[in-house]
Image (tube, helix red, strand yellow):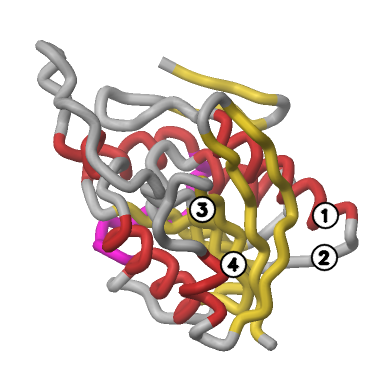
Amino acid sequence: MSWSRGSIAVYVNSCTYPPSDDTILLLEAMEALRREGRVYGSALDLGTGNGALALGAVEVLGVRRVAAVDAYPCPALAARATLPPQALVAVCPYASCLKGGFDIALVNPPYLPEKPPPPGGQGCSPTLSEAWAGEGVMRGMLEAAGRLAGEVLTVYSSLSSVTPQEVLGAMGFSTRILASERFFMERLEVVHAWRS
């Protein structure tokens, strides 16, 4: 199965969610960064899933070096099918297999506060339920992004108990809301953070 938006076309397998409103909002935020004249040579897509944000870094931000990392092999296979051959795709939790030095980290963490009911009869992989893992995983991903990159672009929900401003602010980052949109019961916000 595949999903596309403009020049971004991704492969979606049984253990990755297809891109949704949060992915689209992050891609639009990347376009805003480009319009501001920001230039990035390298990007890390942390918790890559199907690789949509990593591909967005290549196509929208024009990065030359991109790494797409997920904690599970199945999403990494989807990212590998999505990304160009020169992209690094790795399997390790919280990008623990990488050293820092990225210009920007792109993070679409599990921001919902609790897990949904298990899907009925689909035999879904545990990686889909991890997308709802909540506060601890979100905090860990944001902290890893802050250690590995000079800037972070991330999304969160008004339903979340953790905010990127809180986590990244404690690490010395300045933050701003770059994009925001209200959906049925929540507001999604994209936060751009940079080292002060």
Whether residues under marks 2 and 1 lie with C-beta atoms below 8 angstroms apart, the answer is yes
What amino acid type should be assigned to the residue bearing mark 1? Answer: Arg
Q: Residues within 10 Å of mark 4 (few under 14, many from 20)?
A: many
Task: Tell us which disc is closer to us: 3 or 1.
Answer: 1
In terms of secondary structure, where does tag 1 sit?
A: helix
Residue on which disc 4 sits: 152
Image disc number at residue 86: 3
Can you give x and y, in whole percent of width and height, for residue 58 in the image? 65, 49
The magenta stretch is: 83-94
Q: Is residue 40 above or below residue 49?
A: below
Cα–Cα gap, marks 4 and 1: 14 Å
Q: On the rendered structure, is 50 left or right of 178? A: left
What amino acid type should be assigned to the residue bearing mark 2? Answer: Arg
Q: Residue at x 70, y 30 (%)?
A: 7
Q: Is residue 4 above or below residue 104?
A: above
Residue on which disc 1 sits: 34
In terms of secondary structure, where does tag 3 sit?
A: loop
Q: On the rendered structure, is 153 left or right of 89? A: right
Whether residues under marks 2 and 4 lie with C-beta atoms below 8 angstroms apart, the answer is no
Q: Is residue 86 magenta?
A: yes
Cα–Cα gap, marks 3 and 1: 22 Å
Whether residues under marks 4 and 1 lie with C-beta atoms below 8 angstroms apart, the answer is no
Can you give x and y, in whole percent of width and height, for residue 164 in the image? 52, 65
In terms of secondary structure, where does tag 2 sit?
A: loop
| The image quarter in which residue 71 lies | bottom left
3 or 2: tag closer to the N-terminus: 2
Can you give x and y, in whole percent of width and height, for residue 194 in the image? 67, 76
Residue on which disc 2 sits: 38
Task: Tell us which disc is closer to us: 4 or 3.
Answer: 4
Total numbered labels placed on residues in the image? 4
Q: Residues within 10 Å of mark 3 (few under 14, many from 20)?
A: few
2 or 4: tag closer to the N-terminus: 2
